[in-house]
């Protein structure tokens, strides 16, 4: 039932308040990774996935090998989408999506000018749905930049972090 229902469900189940959200479509993931110059990911397994247009077969599939590598946008999307050959299926796909998001955040942390940030924002703006205003997004950049400049953080490399939570359960039909 859409973004509002999803936010409400998460808020009620985990007893947390969600103030902001951001959603990005397939094209936006590709464009974001490419405008960042690629992302470094430790790909957990060898696999092949259909391309961004869901076309399969020789010449269309995107194949990656296990190991640390720099992925372009299409490769990052393939890793985030792949689930067919994963032992844990959709659960493992979620973990791979977290790998891609973490790699994007690592790369975004290296942005050191408003112009670079604006270029990234403009590149994905048509593929992004959020309840943040442009002014709010730019203010987050300014705050992070100030933290780095003034040294308020004892660990400047970890200004942005992701907490990973996993639900335990069992499948049922």
Image (cartoon, rainbow, N blue to C red):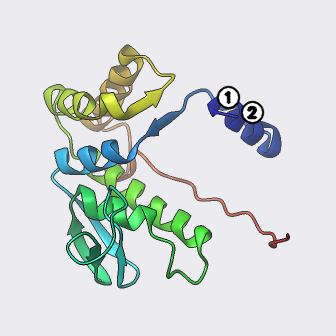
State which quarter of the image contains the C terminus: bottom right
> Which residue is depicted at the point 41% across and 18% down?
136
154 versus 167 height, above or below: above
- Residue 109 appears in the picture as rendered: no
Q: In this image, 118 relative to 14: left or right?
A: left
Badge 1 element: helix
Residue 78 horizontal/vertical position (percent): 35, 65
Q: Label 2: few (<14), some or many (≥20) within 10 Å?
A: some
Residue 108 sits in quarter: top left
Instruction: Find the distance from the CA under tag 1 to the CA under tag 2.
Output: 6 Å
As drawn, 141 above or below 27: above
What residue is disc 1 on? 4
Badge 1 crowding class, 10 Å Cα cut-off, few under 14, some 14 to 19, many 20 or more, is few
User: Which residue is nearer to you in this view: 96 or 156?
Assistant: 96
> What residue would you read off at disc 2?
8
Q: Provide the secondary structure element on which disc 2 rests.
A: helix
Query: In percent of the image, x 37 and y 51: which residue is there?
Result: 155
The structure residue drawn at horizontal position 27% and vertical position 50%, both measured from the top left corner, is 30
């Amino acid at each position: 039932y859409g973004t509002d229902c999803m936010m409400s469900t998460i808020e009620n189940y985990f007893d947390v308040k969600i103030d902001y959200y951001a959603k990005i479509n397939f094209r936006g993931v590709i464009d974001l990774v490419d405008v960042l110059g690629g992302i470094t990911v430790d790909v957990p397994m060898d696999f092949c996935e259909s391309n961004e247009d869901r076309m399969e077969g020789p010449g269309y599939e995107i194949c990656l090998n296990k190991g640390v590598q720099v992925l372009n946008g299409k490769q990052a999307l393939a890793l985030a989408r792949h689930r067919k050959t994963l032992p844990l299926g959709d659960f493992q796909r979620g973990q791979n999506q977290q790998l891609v998001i973490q790699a994007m955040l690592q790369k975004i942390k290296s942005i050191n000018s408003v112009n670079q940030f604006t270029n990234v924002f403009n590149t994905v703006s048509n593929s992004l749905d959020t309840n943040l205003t442009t002014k709010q997004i730019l203010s987050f950049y300014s705050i992070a930049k100030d933290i780095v400049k003034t040294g308020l953080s004892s660990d400047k490399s970890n200004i942005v972090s992701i907490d990973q939570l996993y639900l335990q359960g069992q499948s049922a039909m």
